Amino acid sequence: MKYSTVLSLGLAGFLLAAGSALSLIAAPESEVEIGESIHAVIAKLGEPEGQFQQGRILTFYYSRGMVDFTDGIVVKSTLVSSDEARQIRQARERLEADQRSRAEAEQNRLTREGATELQRRLDDKAFAAQPPDVRLAAWQDFARRYPYTDVTAQIAGANQNLNQVLRQQQAQEGIQRIDQRRTEIKARFHQLDKDYAASLANWKRNEITAERNHLNAELAELNSRLLTLKPAPKP
């Protein structure tokens, strides 16, 4: 074979290969037309990356966009080019990275401020002297403002103190009610004594005696409850 012939064949092969490569690069991306079937879309784009059914509308998800079908026929397509899809993806990734960076910076700021504020409150004697309901509300507000600083122990302590105060208030109210009832019973005893002395009828005296017995039983119960409500004497 002559050199010129070989050169011609080689040049022809190179041009053929280059032309094939250029045709691949320049080949338009598959588009979807309204009215095409699901099978036609899958033949062009391949199987979807995801899909969702809502009523009669079936949506295929691709990296380039979405295709909506009704009864197996394309009714809407929001496909974009691969370049546009890549730009959208990169923009979304930049936005997500920026949001993560901002969130981390905000978390770091709240962590620093929370630690400083926590120590300040722990050292504040005036704050420690506040009523438990005030301290509980303050710690709960602190937890909302500084979610990365753990104050569960402080909230639990203030809540426990508040419960103790409430129990003491309830006990005091119970003691006052008992004392009032005891006073009423003593006054009733005094009146019964006078009625008993003034009455000559046995049935009346029997009624008075029965009422006194009932009041004595109630008084004994009140005295027993009083012992449970009053704090034990300090040793």
Image (cartoon, helix red, strand yellow):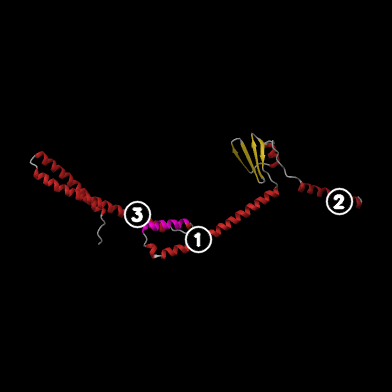
Mark positioned earlier in the residue sequence (3 or 2): 2
User: Which label's residue is closer to the chain start, 1 or 2?
Assistant: 2
- What is the CA distance from the residue labelled 3 to the residue labelled 1? 30 Å
Q: Are marks 3 and 1 in contact (CB under 8 Å)?
A: no
Q: Is residue 209 above or below residue 119?
A: above
List the residue tagged with mark 2: 11
**Magenta span:** 131-144
The residue wearing badge 1 is 111
Density class for disc 1 (Cα within 10 Å; few <14, some 14-19, many ≥20) is: some
Residue 152 in view: no
Measured from the top left, where is residue 94 in percent x and y? 63, 55
User: Does 136 lie within the magenta span?
Assistant: yes
User: Is residue 70 left or right of 115 when viewed as pictured?
Assistant: right
Left or right of residue 228: residue 216 = left
**Please, what is the three-letter code of the amino acid marked with disc 2?**
Leu
**Percent position of residue 123, x then y:** 41, 65
Residue sitting farthest toward the top: 71
**Residue 76 versus residue 25 in the image, above or below:** above
The question of residue 49 being in magenta is answered with no
Q: Quadrant of the C terminus?
A: bottom left
**Residue identifier under label 3:** 163
Pointer 3: residues within 10 angstroms few (<14), some, or many (20+)? some
